Every structure is written in C-alpha cells, then in structure tokens.
Image: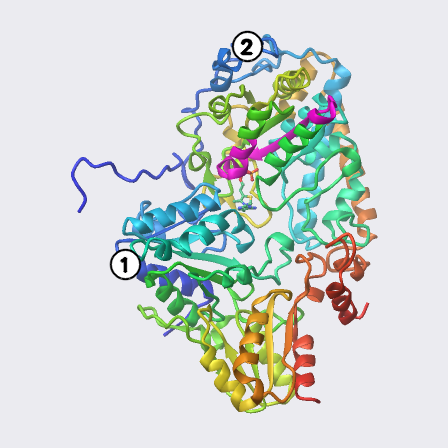
Amino acid sequence: MPRRNAPELFIPEPRLRPGDKPDFSNLDIPPVGVLDKPDEMVDFTEIPEHARSMIRVLDDDHKAKGAWDPHLDPETLRGGLRNMLKTRVYDERMHKMQRQGKMSFYMKCTGEEAVAVAQATALRPSDMLFATYRQQGLLITRGHSMLDMMCHCLSNSRDYCKGRQMPIFYTWREGNYFSISGSVGTQFSQAVGWAMAAAYKGQDDIACTWVGDGTTAEADFHYALTFAAVYRAPVILNVVNNQWAISSFQGIAGGISATFANRGRGYGLPGLRVDGNDFLAVYAATQWAADRARRGGGATLIEHYTYRADAHSTSDDPSKYRPRKEWEAWPLGDPIERLKNHLIVLGEWSEEQHEQLRKELEEEVAALFREAESYGTLHTGPRPDINLMFEDVYEEMPLNLRRQRQQVGV
Amino acid sequence: MTSMNMIQALNSAMDCLLDRDPNVVIMGEDVGYFGGVFRATAGLQQKYGRQRVFDTPIAEGGIVATAIGMGVNGLRPIAEIQFSDYIYPAIDQIVSEAARLRYRSGGEYYAPITIRSPCGGGIFGGQTHSQSPEGIFTHVSGLTTVMPSNPYDAKGLLIAAVESNDPVLFFEPKRIYNGPFDGDPNKPAEDWSRHEGGDVPEEYYSLPLRQAAIVREGADLTVITYGTMVHVSRAAVERSGFDAEIIDLRTLVPLDIETITKSVHKTGRCVVVHEATRTGGFGAEILSQIQEDCFWDLEAPIERVTGWDTPYPHAFEWEYFPGQERVLTAIEKVMGA
Ligand SMILES: Cc1ncc(C[n+]2csc(CCOP(=O)(O)OP(=O)(O)O)c2C)c(N)n1
Ligand SMILES: [Mg+2]
C-alpha cells in the first residue's frame, strides 16, 4: 500500500515535445571570458567552476575574448573552417545518397563539427583517437582519403572494412584512428589502456576518446574514469553532450542534476565544460588537457556542450519526440557560422569566399562520390570478394571456416 | 480477431499486461515517449503514464540489474534491450544474478523479469544489429529462452513470459516484425495479413511456454527450427516435394524434447535449422538430444543448417543468411535424394 508522503518514482521529462515552440530560455549559458585559465598542472580541487560553468571564447560580436583565447593564426582558423565545412558537405552528400538507396545507413554530425575538427587540429597526428560514429571530422581534419571513406560506406569492392561493417564504422590505423564499434562506449576505456601503454613505453603521445551524453551511462564510461584516475593515464576523455541520445534527452543520462564535466571530480579528475560550438574554446580546452597529460598530470574530462541538429541516423525521425527546428533556436548557434563570422570580423574571410569554398567543396565531394560509385554500391556493381567473409575471424583460418567457405563455393 | 503484425501483437500483449496488473512496468532505451526504435511500446506511456513505461539510461547492465531489484520488490518488469547485439553489457546480471537467484537463495528470492530483444539479420544491420545470441543463454540453466515466429505466438508467449516467475529472454526476430520472410530478399515483401499467424485476438490470452508447435505435419522427415527460419524452412519444404513435419520450438529452453522425439520416431530423418552461428549453437544441443533419445529411429545422419561461424557480415548478408537453397540441400541430403 502506498503511504502518504512517501517519495514518488521520478521520471525525468524534457520541457518541450513536438508541437511546442522551441525555447531555450531556461538554459544558463555563462558569458564569454568568465573563467580563468589555470596552469595545466593545477590540482583538480582548485578548479570546480570549470566543470560547472562554461569555457567560451567567441562572443556574440564574433570576437575572441578572455583567458582561453588560443590566439590561433588566420591560416589555422581558415583550415578549421574548411574542415568543418567539408565535414558538413560530406555529410549532406552521403545522407542524400543513402536516401537514394546506395548504402544501408548513414549518420551525420551536423552542428557538432567543431568538436572533432578543433580537437584534431589541437592534437598531434601521432596522438591516438578512439572516436564514436559522430566524429567524422577527425578523419577529415587528419586528411584521411575521402574516397576511402565513401567506398567503405558503400560496402563496395574498395571497402577497407572488406564488406563486413555497416557504413560509418571507419578504421584508419595509419592515421592513428581506432576502428569504430557498434557497441557504444567500449572505446572509452580502451583508450585509457592505450594511454597506460604509452606511459609504460615512455611515449609522449596521448590518447583522446569520445562518448555521447547518453553513453555516459554505460559501465565503460565509469571504467575509463576510474582507471584513468588510478593510473594517471595520459588521455583526454570527452563527453559530447548534444542533448539527445536517439529520443532520450540528456536528463535520462543524469544531466539534470549535475553537469557531465563535473563527474570527473568525483573520480579525482579535472572537468572542463566547454561551448562545443565554439571552435576556439574547444581548441583551447583540448590543448590544455593535452599539455596536462603530456606533462604527467593525467586525464581530463571535457564536456562539449552542443546540440544534435539533425536526426540520430537515417533510421530516426526526431519530429516524433522533439520540437521541429529546435536547432535554429540553439543559443550557442552553428559552429561553422560562428567561426566564419569571426574570420570576417578579423578581416581574414568574406561571405563571397565562403560561398566559393562551399561550391568548391560540393563539387569536390560530388566528384569523389562518382568515383567511389564506380567501385560499386551496396546493391549494384562490383562487390567485395566473397572470400573475405571468412577471413580475419582468426589470424589463421581454422578448419571449420575453411569447410564453410568451401560450401559457399569459393 | 484482428490482423496484426508482430510489433502490433507485442504492443497488444504489453497493453493487456499493463491493464491487468499494476505491477507490470516497461523499461528500456527509447521505449517511453517515443515508443521504442521498432515502435513496440508506441502509445503505452501515453496510455499508462510515465511511471509505468519509461526510458532508461543507455546501460544494459543497469537495466537488467534494476529490473531484478524491482522484481524482488514485487514488480514484474519488462525490460527492452534495443538490439540483442547490445545485451552483452548485461551478461553478468543475467547469468550470475537473474538465472541463479532462486537457486542460490534456497528459493527465497527470484527474478520475475522478462527481457525483450529484437534479434536476427536480414536487414543489412551489419554485425551489431543482426546477431542471434540465443545460444549463449540456452547454455545457462535458470533462464527460459523464447523466440516466436509469428504475431499470434508472439502475443501469447510474451504474456506467458511476463507472468512467469522465472527470468525469460524473449528474442524477437526483427526481420519478421512486418511480415513473414521466406529467405528470398528479391521477392516483394509480404505482410502478416495473409498469414494465419497474423490473426491475433485483441483480448488477453496466453500460450504455454516450454511447448513446441507443429506448424506442418508430415511423414518423410522432421525439420526442427524457430524464429525467422520457420518461414524459410517451410518454403524449402514446399520446394522439396517431400512431406516434412516442421516443428517450431518457440521455447528453446526448457526444451520440449517430447514433441521432437515423437516426430523423429515417426519420420526417422531430421534437419535442424537456425540462423545463429554453428559451433556450439543451439542446434548442436538438439542434435545430441535426438541422438540420445532416437538413435535407433534414425535412418540418416541429421543435418544442420546454420549461419557461418563468422560475425554477421554487412555486404554478404545473403551469402551468410541460411536461405532456402541451403535448407533444401540439407533436406535432399537426409532424404538421400
Ligand atoms: C551497447 C549499446 N547499447 C545501445 C546501442 C544503441 N544506440 C546506438 S546510438 C545510441 C544513442 C547514443 O546517444 P549518445 O551517447 O548521446 O550519442 P549521440 O548519438 O547523441 O552522438 C543508442 C542507444 C548501442 N549502439 N550500443
Ligand atoms: Mg547525445
């Protein structure tokens, strides 16, 4: 029998649902430049505000402000802009091609481009990346062949995953980029192990890894923080808080009562909460955490505060669970627009150049896609060799698989 | 009777359960407001309220663990694991906890939970949206493992599973959510409306667990299967021209060995078909039980048709999937044809 005054089972619920008018006036977005930039080796207990407030550099007037301004040269800024735009153009093309049935599935990172692109810009090429499916900007920034990326997504005769993986589960060993898993979160603690090995070997390369807000609930997130803290592993642990995990808002992952960045503190790790749509802030926080890790200060947990602008994947329809056009009301804007406007204010870029760049990238990506298609698509044209189905299960193929391969007739 | 697809039948089962028993709750990733990525719980939160149908954090181990705790405190949770490929983070809670709770506590405690999870391939889901992991759980005593092959069974068996005081793993072959699938991907998709298994009463009913169904009677050979492969086997049998008896296991463990042995005793020939990988698959268990109980009835070695011993490969979906041809070859082989 329920007793009066007994607690009730609380089920978190987002404020707005389909049909409601987008409104983020409840969000507490701290002004630009309020946080100081401590020495990288600071004791984590001394910077509690950095895990609760927000590191921001780009202001509404498009100028860079405050202690966290990384003072990047215009060349680097234009490179970042280009890589973000290229990522978006790539996503748009691939999404469209999925809709035409050329591949089984696709996932965009629209609105979140700054996270991957700024971080790959701030890290060294030899640092090891353990990403999720939503950081394609890492590959693009590190210069992975876009043709290879497309051929993988098309599962065609040139797919380096050999036809075995769904689209977007890239792998690129040469680029120090770890094979993406379909089981969310697993890479987060693996990255810590990689970093422990780097320390063991006396390398000063670090690991960098990502999970979404929703995935912080998985045990792997907690393994990662525990092991990273215990062994002072040189790793950057990123939570990309894009507010949604498929249809579940971040409150279902525990985001209502405390920030994700603040979780680091419970494990003895510094937490930084960053405006994830601010290229400069993401760059600066990453650089800080990387320096700390390289100097032996161990891991940092960074929360990137952003918004998933589009559907979770091509299998999802967000109009069923959140207001339409909510992204347009997102108070932290569009990362590409913000960096573009910053460059314009600096006198280093113009709307015309931007349009020109977009056109160039669209043509480049479309041409690459045509080339990729000549190697086949999921359902037409050349396919990966069927023998590949049985290879790489083991280093050496066992008898049962050799027999099964014979049954397939190859 | 109404025509329902499997999603609607499952939804209807959960609707009946929520309506009859205030202790039934539904939990899982995206099952609440949205109604699940396959829409199995669509409308149920709106009808029964947030406390009875709710989203969980993305933590399969946490989902099963809290379901066990709720079950110990008198609730009857239905936990959805979004894809059976994502059940592994929950293995410890299922195997070490739910399965053995009754045994280790001398019968004091038990876990009256049902874990629903879409399984199987045929949708180009690659290795993390296509697996058939039932064999991992059939190896664990204390668990009941169920896999329906049509909407009517799905509803009746889900109701029985939830009402069972033992933990039940309820695997739903997602390829046949919308219609039966005979293994030929080039044929236009069929829906359930023209299949007898698509006739589903709207009201409450349950079907017994631990009981196989004979979906086709026959005298020449016995085909033992479950899930999607029931439909593939049926099509292969029609093509073979042999008078096969087809057994749909429905509950894998505890196994209805009597229905199997009766049939094999009659036919003397047998083919076992499942989509899951071969080595250590549930088919191996069926084979050895038949060998133990029916050795002297057998007129030919038993054949097994299964998925290959590889992860589920995205681009080779139809080379991997054990389709009609492979079932047909096995039938012809045991018939000596
Ligand atoms: C272990 C596991 N459980 C469930 C899923 C299904 N799934 C794929 S993505 C996703 C949501 C992840 O959300 P979040 O971590 O916030 O990342 P985002 O997609 O927003 O980038 C879920 C539940 C999965 N892939 N793996
Ligand atoms: Mg998210």
Secondary structure type for disc 1: helix
Is any atom of residue B37 visible in this view?
yes
Q: CA distance from mark 1 to mark 2?
A: 55 Å
Along the viewing direction, whichever of B315 and A276 lies nearer the viewer:
B315
- Image location (x, y in percent) of residue B82: 50, 51
Q: Residue at x 68, y 47 (%)?
A: A96
On residue B31, the disc is none
On residue A33, the disc is 2
Kind of residue at badge 2: Gly
The residue indicated by pointer 1 is B19
- Image location (x, y in percent) of residue A400: 73, 65
A4 w.r.t. B135: above or below: above
Q: Quadrant of the N terminus of chain B?
A: bottom left
Q: Quadrant of residue A283?
A: top right
The chain identifier of the residue carrying mark 2 reads A
Kind of residue at badge 1: Asp
Q: On the picture, is A265 further left or further right than A356?
A: left
Along the viewing direction, whichever of A50 and B290 lies nearer the viewer:
B290
The chain identifier of the residue carrying mark 1 reads B
- Image location (x, y in percent) of residue A201: 74, 26
Q: From the Cβ of disc 2, is ligand 2 less than 8 Å away? A: no
Q: Quadrant of the C terminus of chain B?
A: bottom right
Is any atom of residue A352 visible in this view?
no
- Image location (x, y in percent) of residue A192: 62, 31
Q: Residue at x 31, y 68 (%)?
A: B204
Give the residues in magenta: A199-224
Tell if the residue under mark 1 belongs to the same chain as the one under mark 2: no
